[in-house]
Image: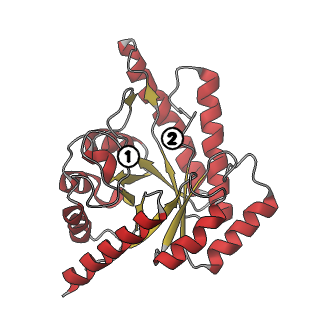
Amino acid sequence: MTTYTFGITAFLGPFETPEAWIPIAVEAGAQGLEVRAEPDFAQPFTMTARERKRLRGLLCEAALNVSLHAPLYDINPASPNPKAEALAWSELSACVDLAQELGAGVLVIHPGSVPAEHPPHYREQAWRRFIFGLETLGTYAQGRGVQVALENKQRGRGEDLVTTPEEHLQVLQSVPSVGACLDLGHSHTLGIDPQVYVDALGPRLLHVHLHDNQGSRDEHLPLGEGTLDWRRALSVLDASNYSGVVVLELADVASIEQTLVQVRAERTNDAR
């Protein structure tokens, strides 16, 4: 039996504020909205208390399940540069506070990374730095009623620390206060079976991102326009009794509406 719900992401491109995405989510029939904590959008160091209160009020009024995604750009919590690393963890801590103030129960963060060209010891040191910082962040978030969900990354030019179920589990086993965000589009670029990933994460799976691609790079296509077997992926979530939110990471409003119609039809057919 399906127990999860569908949400959408507030991308920066189509609209200038996260508030503008609220009626889009409601009209499309989404039950959740993931806000991006990016500069000039919902950045924790620049949002005023009044802006935070207003946004939370609008989200509550719309009865949307809220999650917050930490900044994607210029943030590397495993950076070999001590100042850059410290800035990243400071930003992520501020995101915890913002998540609490917006009523977001989940804060999604990306793992750190090392450059494609690096000495062998860089990766080992990056792991140690990332685990240490994540322990502190996870505990801080728990005290504020926020769950940190670590997201897996896609095939890319550099070396992200978490791209496989094994790497994801390595972090989760080291940091009990943190859960997982499984990005099915990202895992598809690496050819990882959804069943294998969901089984590996088990009860640590808190949050899911869903979008399509051709299997070689991250494209954020509507479902059915790539090669991801999204129907099977949803069936795997069904069988695992996943009860969180499946966030459709699509930037185009028409694509959101089209995809929500598809997934609703699929859920209806499965229920028959």
In this rendering, position of residue 100 left or right of residue 244: right
| Along the line of sight, the residue nearer the viewer: 143 or 202 | 202
Give the residue drawn at x 40%, y 53%.
Answer: 181
The residue at 53%/66% (across/down) is 33
- Local packing at callout 2 (Cα closer than 10 Å; few below 14, some 14-19, many 20+) is many
Q: What amino acid is at disc 2?
A: Leu
According to the picture, the residue beneath numbered tag 1 turns out to be 172
Which corner quadrant of the image does residue 257 belong to?
Answer: bottom left
- Is residue 162 rendered to the left or right of residue 12? left
Taking the image as shown, residue 244 lies to the left or right of residue 270, namely right
Residue most toward the front?
Answer: 254
Rendered view: 269 above or below 46: below
Residue 60 visible at all: yes
Badge 2 element: helix
* Mark closer to the chain start, 2 or 1: 2
Q: Residue 42: horizontal and vertical position, in percent?
A: 66, 53
Above or below: residue 97 compared with residue 215 = below
In this orientation, which residue lies closer to the viewer: 202 or 7? Answer: 7
The disc at residue 134 is 2
**What amino acid does circle 1 point to?**
Leu
- Classify the position of the N terminus by image quarter: bottom left
Foreground residue, 248 or 27?
A: 27
Q: Secondary structure at mark 1?
A: helix
Q: Is residue 103 visible?
A: no
